[in-house]
Image (spheres, rainbow, N blue to C red):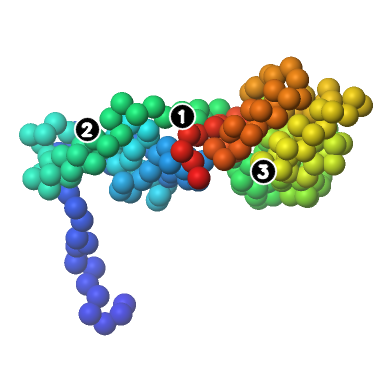
């Protein structure tokens, strides 16, 4: 043990409430806020709760809503906790009644795929189950005896991963059109240009709808939508692998 270190020494923490861990012991309300929500959500303070990830949000903002990770009534809060709560309310006032875009969590990020492959490589007894549950049947059948083959295939095509029917798929439609990524604006511009090619227009329309949730009927309508929204578009994996328009986004 390093000299001067004492096991009995307690770490200084900001105590929010006096509940002795009997009531309202949670101190986290959400997973870490990521780039999925630029301008729409932010972490005000990290929080801790058993079983929650290190970067979990203790106090956060989502649009004009404040997320507070504790549940004790003011009478059970510490003086510091009460002051912190009031300060958060004052900070949140600037967002009062302002609309915001809600990005629903409908899928898991493509980064989770690597986690699944890691588990499959460590436990061969679950590999078949994971392949059937998280990947389309044609791939789970093709790579039934070769999980590493599946991993290599997905790593090579990670920019084309999307989720459908609770399974991670590679967008072969985009690949056939010569597009190598489904999450950048260049992809949308290319697809809109392809609407003018009668041999590719139908497939381009399908892909545009898949990634924007829009269904315009003419190339000009798509072009007008793109020019109006290009500066405000973000792509979200967990938001069902599609683009969202966020006003004011730079």
Q: Quadrant of the N terminus?
A: bottom left
Q: Which residue is mark 2?
A: 71
Q: CA distance from mark 1 to mark 3?
A: 19 Å
Quick one: which residue is furthest to the bottom in this view? 3
- Marks 2/3 in contact by CB < 8 Å: the verdict is no
Q: CA distance from mark 2 to mark 3?
A: 41 Å
Q: Earlier in the sequence, mark 2 or mark 3?
A: 2
Residue at figure coordinates x 84%, y 28% from the top left: 196
Residue at figure coordinates x 59%, y 32% from the top left: 228
Label annotation for residue 101: 1
Q: In the picture, residue 57 is in which quadrant? A: top left
Figure check: 138 above or below 78: above
Residue 109 relative to residue 150: left or right: left
Figure check: 43 above or below 173: below
- Element under disc 1: loop
Q: CA distance from mark 2 to mark 1?
A: 27 Å
Q: Earlier in the sequence, mark 2 or mark 1?
A: 2
Whole-percent x, y for residue 91 in the image: 24, 41
């Amino acid at each position: 043990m390093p000299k001067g270190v004492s096991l009995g020494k307690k770490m200084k923490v900001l105590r929010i409430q006096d509940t002795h861990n009997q009531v309202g012991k949670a101190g986290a309300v959400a997973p870490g806020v990521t780039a999925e929500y630029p301008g729409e959500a932010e972490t005000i303070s990290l929080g801790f709760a058993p079983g929650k990830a290190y970067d979990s949000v203790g106090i956060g903002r989502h649009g004009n809503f404040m997320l507070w990770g504790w549940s004790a009534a003011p009478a059970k809060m510490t003086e510091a906790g009460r002051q912190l709560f009031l300060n958060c309310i004052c900070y949140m006032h600037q967002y009062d009644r302002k609309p915001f875009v809600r990005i629903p969590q409908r899928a898991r990020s493509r980064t989770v795929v690597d986690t699944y492959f890691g588990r499959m490589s460590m436990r061969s007894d679950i590999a078949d189950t994971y392949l059937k549950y998280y990947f389309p049947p044609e791939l789970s059948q093709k790579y039934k005896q070769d999980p590493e083959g599946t991993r290599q295939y997905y790593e090579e095509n990670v920019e084309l991963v999307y989720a459908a029917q609770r399974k991670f798929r590679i967008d072969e439609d985009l690949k056939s059109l010569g597009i190598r990524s489904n999450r950048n604006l260049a992809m949308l511009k290319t697809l809109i240009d392809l609407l003018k090619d009668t041999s590719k227009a139908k497939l381009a329309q399908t892909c545009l709808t898949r990634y924007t949730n829009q269904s315009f009927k003419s190339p000009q309508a798509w072009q007008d939508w793109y020019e109006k929204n290009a500066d405000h578009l973000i792509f979200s994996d967990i938001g069902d692998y599609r683009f969202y328009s966020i006003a004011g986004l730079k």
